[in-house]
Amino acid sequence: MEGIVRHALKSNPYLDIVLLHFADKDKMSDYNNAKTPGVIIQHEKVAEYYTISSINLAKEVNDRILNGEFTCAMIL
């Protein structure tokens, strides 16, 4: 991810970038075991370093599934 962001900003330093973390079974399993998924930790480090925005849809979707608003079948 860092390489992609670095090359994109090198090509156009005015480029707006937003990292989106999408839900999947592995991320949900980590969240349900009180862990932040490793890939999200790493991507957040990139976002912080380059001061770009990120949206953690994975956490939001997982929380809504636990709250009964969504079902797992919706993301599988």
Image (tube, helix red, strand yellow):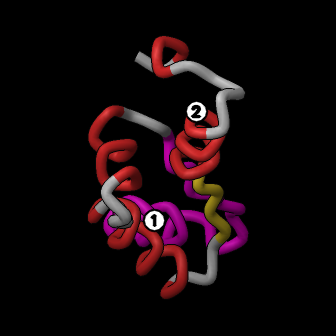
Give the camera-side residue of 56 and 45: 56
The verdict on residue 70 being magenta is no
Rendered location of residue 40, percent (x, y) = 39, 62
How many numbered callouts? 2
The answer to whether the residue labelled 1 contacts the one labelled 2, judged by CB atoms less than 8 Å apart, is no
The residue to which callout 1 is attached is 5
Q: Tell me: 67 left or right of 76.
A: right
Q: Which residues are magenta?
A: 1-22
Question: Furthest-bottom residue in view?
Answer: 49
Hey, which quadrant is residue 69 in on the image? Answer: top right
Q: Nearer the viewer, mark 1 or mark 2?
A: 2
| Residue in the picture at 53% in, 83% down | 48
| Left or right: 74 in relation to 41 | right
Residue 11 point in image, percent of width and height: 52, 64
- Disc 2 target residue: 65
Q: As displayed, is residue 40 above or below residue 59?
A: below
Quarter assignment of residue 71: top right
40 or 62: nearer the viewer: 62
The amino acid type of the residue labelled 2 equals Ile
Picture coordinates of residue 22, whole percent (x, y): 50, 40
Cα gap from disc 1 to disc 2, whole angstroms: 31 Å
At label 1, counting other C-alpha atoms closer than 10 Å, the crowd grade (few under 14, some 14-19, many 20 or more) is some
| SS of the residue under disc 1 | helix
Tell me the element at label 2. Answer: helix
Q: Where is the N terminus found, in terms of image quarters?
A: bottom left
Is residue 54 placed above or below 42 in the rendered structure?
above
Q: Is 72 in front, or is 48?
A: 72
Q: Residue at x 32, y 33 (%)?
A: 25
